[in-house]
Image (spheres, grey):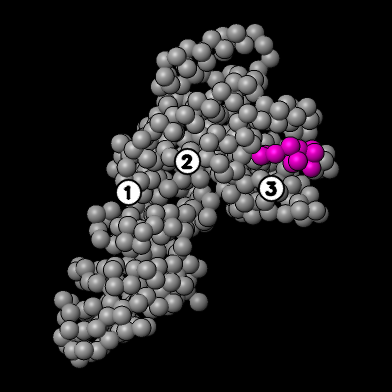
Amino acid sequence: MELACLTAEVSASAVRKNLSLLRGCLRNPVKLCAVVKADCYGHGLDKLLGVISQAADCLAVTTPEEAVELRDSGYERPVMTLFSTQACADGGDLRSAMEELIARRVTLTVVSPDEVAVLAEAAQRVGGIAEVHVKVDSGMGRSGMPAESAPSLVQLIRGQKRIRLTGLYTHFATADAADKTYARGQIKRFLAAADACGRNGSAVPSALPSALRLRLEERLRLEESSPSNGLTLHMANSAGLIDLRESHLDMVRPGLSIYGYQPSDEMHNKLPLQPALRLWGRLMQVKELPSGAGCGYGLTYTLDRPGRLGLVPIGYADGYFRCLSNKATMRIRGKDVPVRGRVSMDQTIIDLGEVPEARVGDVVEIISNDPAAPHSVENLARLAGTIPYEITVRLGKRVKRVLVD
């Protein structure tokens, strides 16, 4: 059955524009690794893979399942997982998962020495080489090997014939904040860890502070005659790419910005990104209620005059937040109308008092692709006290994604 109560139009041209803007921030030969985890942040991997792969050098996902999905779709270029495989399985399941990922040439993240022997054994069994990147915790306190311990893990990996270390990376905690002091401290800690790991073979970013740049340039000159231990270094997320150019290193990993949303309101630099998603449904009922009537669970809204209400087939089961009750707006026939009463699991009430011409079957725009609209992803996030990421990734399976130009 092709019918759907909710349709998310995902704009290919918007994604192309955003990727072009992001590319324009990079110096050559910095690579762009597009993060397509969580179904392209809720926009639909099956719809956007062809668009994104045209502009990206490689793709990053979180889980082994997402990596396998990419390979099953026919994507042949580099893919890396941002989770350690041990996060997803143990015992025989872990061994099978590692074997499949190695056989499918997926670059794996390593965060601890415990993974090394298991990886080497899996690679031996499939007769392959496990390509890995080590994740370094440079100050976020989340996943990754502590920066001071990274050299010992790198040394352990380099002692394995069946494992090839090709990269080191870390993740920012505060790159989207106005104050970049902590983020710049993470850059220094990460580069110091990379230095201690014997990293070689890449130009020093010109935007680094002069003292640090000179030190790194001197190290590279000293190592020119030694065997190359060249590793791809990467740390810049969307905020780092746009607002912290010295973090670009060898590769960047934009995610949210690809889909058209600003990482935060605090950034000094912003690109004219175009939101890729527009969500709409149809008005499924219209009714007249007298003054004093309440509506929705808990009767949290009471009409102060006779009113005309409409029903839209979306609720928190579809990712439309319950906390938007009596706060958000939707758009019908070009007019913004308020949400009335509590958002239910499957239905939301809107006030049609200012749109007397509205009829059952009319299109109701629930999320706008105009960033200035009151019902844009970013403005809905503000109303909900959250971030744009959560608005898009929460969109459920009942929302039909359609690729439009």
Q: Is residue 22 visible?
A: no
In this figure, which residue is indicated by the disc labeled 3? 85
In this figure, which residue is indicated by the disc labeled 2? 173
Residue at 17% across, 84% down: 304
In this rendering, the label closer to the viewer, 1 or 3: 3
Q: Mark 1 and mark 2: span between their CA atoms?
A: 25 Å
In this figure, which residue is indicated by the disc labeled 1? 274
Vertical position of residue 57 compared to residue 372: above or below: above
Task: Pick whichever of labels 1 and 2 is earlier in the sequence.
Answer: 2
Amino acid bearing label 1: Gln
Amino acid bearing label 2: Ala
Q: Residues within 10 Å of mark 1 (few under 14, many from 20)?
A: many
Q: Mark 3 and mark 2: span between their CA atoms?
A: 23 Å
Q: Is residue 363 left or right of residue 91?
A: left
Quarter of the C terminus within the rendering: bottom left
Quadrant of res 108: top right
Bounds of the magenta span?
110-120
